[in-house]
Image (cartoon, rainbow, N blue to C red):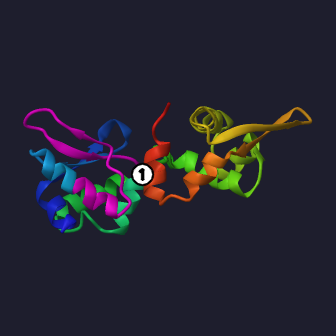
Amino acid sequence: MLRGIIASEGNVRLIRKSNDRLGEISVAGKEKEKREFIRKLLMNLEILPDRDKEIEGQECVLITGLSNFKLMAKWRLCRLQPEKEERFEKGIKNFRKVESRKGELRLKILQLLAKDERTCYQLASILDRSLSTIYRKGLKILVKQGYVERGELVKRIRRWKITKNGLEILKLPPTIALEILRKVP
């Protein structure tokens, strides 16, 4: 059903300045109820829509981010309309940097810290991210949210550990955990 909705109401937008990289997929829905229905269908496939565009005459659900696009490719959601499928395939191929959905990096950090305390350097190495990204977009926010705390300082290297609240987040279904983790305090 979602394939049909995307075939008739969807738009695949490429970013020309970024070598025709996939920018966003929008699914038109004038009424709020229709947009909520589309969001629920997407979330059942673990695709997390970014936000609704609510400008009069342009109302739609927006989908962004490589993680969401990979899920759309897995479910072949753009395949019913050949022109949209071609643009989607071209756009997803032109992604250079692997990006995470909002909250996904934080979820991965929590999963790693649930196994063992780690340093920022260890997390950056495992997740193939820069130290500043791990700290600024991950640990710093997780500390504010109360899911991670500073551990011991061993030989001038800080270790990080998960809190009880962090362990509780990991017990939730991934889509709910991501929704919680994407909110910045």
Identify which amino acid the numbered label 1 is placed on.
Leu
55 within the magenta span: yes
Q: Residues within 10 Å of mark 1 (few under 14, many from 20)?
A: some
Residue in the image at 50% along x and 30% along y: 185
**Which of the image's four quarters has the N terminus?**
bottom left
Residue in the image at 56% along x and 47% along y: 105
Task: Judge by depth and name the residue closer to the eye, 37 or 76.
Answer: 37
Could you tell me residue 89's position as x and y percent? Answer: 32, 60
- Please give left or right for residue 19 compared with residue 126 in the image: left
113 within the magenta span: no
Task: Judge by depth and name the residue closer to the eye, 123 or 43.
Answer: 43
Residue in the image at 33% along x and 58% along y: 43
Residue placed under numbered mark 1 in the picture? 66
Residue in the image at 38% along x and 60% along y: 46
Quarter residue 9 falls in:
bottom left
Task: Judge by depth and name the residue closer to the eye, 178 or 99.
Answer: 178
Q: Is residue 146 above or below residue 70?
A: above
- Please give left or right for residue 108 compared with residue 131 in the image: left
Quarter residue 4 falls in:
bottom left
Q: Could you say whether the residue bearing mark 1 is in a helix, strand or loop?
A: helix
Residue extending furthest toward the right = 155
Quarter residue 40 falls in:
bottom left
- Please give left or right for residue 48 compared with residue 27 in the image: right
Tell me the magenta residue range: 38-65
Q: Is residue 174 above or below residue 132?
A: below
Could you tell me residue 124's position as x and y percent? Answer: 68, 44
Q: Does any portion of residue 109 appear in the rendered image?
A: no
